[in-house]
Image (cartoon, rainbow, N blue to C red):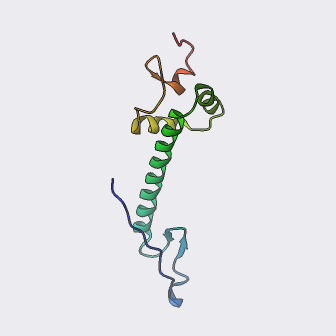
Amino acid sequence: MNQIAVSPAPPPRKEEQADYQVVGLRIVGGDDDAAAHRVDRQQQRLAFRRRCENIAVSLAGSSPEERAAAYASRTYTSHELSTAAALRPDLMPVVNGEWEWIALTLADLD
């Protein structure tokens, strides 16, 4: 896994203050906008991946009733659950060979 080191942006010089604005770690405007956007997107992807791995760990440690309640309340999106299953299939609950959150929506669980 690639790790990206990001340092905070230096304070703008007086003549540059109107050219760009720092929003979080993303620089808006100026020449560095594309590079800053790439770093921001990579950090978002890494954060999403970590969140999905944590979902898999959380579901593995939950009781069936707790998991069913989480699925029913839509605590996790199907994208998060699918990604969690792709990243950590060993931890994701399965019912009759199907991922549990999918199996609970099927009419035939036999």
Instruction: Decide if residue 75 is on the left or right side of residue 98.
Output: right
Instruction: Decide if residue 3 is on the left or right side of residue 10.
Output: left
Q: Where is residue 23 in the image (x, y as percent from the top left)?
A: 55, 69
Image height of 44 relative to 72, above or below? below
Q: Where is residue 74 in the image (x, y as percent from the top left)?
A: 62, 35
Q: Position of residue 73 (x, y in %)?
A: 66, 33
Kindly give the residue lying farthest to the bottom in the view shown: 14
Q: Residue at x 50, y 68 (%)?
A: 25
Q: Residue at x 62, y 26 (%)?
A: 65
Instruction: Decide if residue 100 is on the left or right side of residue 35.
Output: right
How many discs appear?
Answer: 0
Q: Residue at x 48, y 53 (%)?
A: 47
Image height of 36 relative to 105, above or below? below
Judging depth in this view, the residue of 45 and 61 nearest the camera is 61
Q: Which residue is drawn at 47% across and 81% down?
A: 10
Kindly give the residue lying farthest to the top in the view shown: 110
Q: Where is residue 75 in the image (x, y as percent from the top left)?
A: 62, 38
Image height of 3 relative to 14, above or below? above
Image height of 99 relative to 40, above or below? above
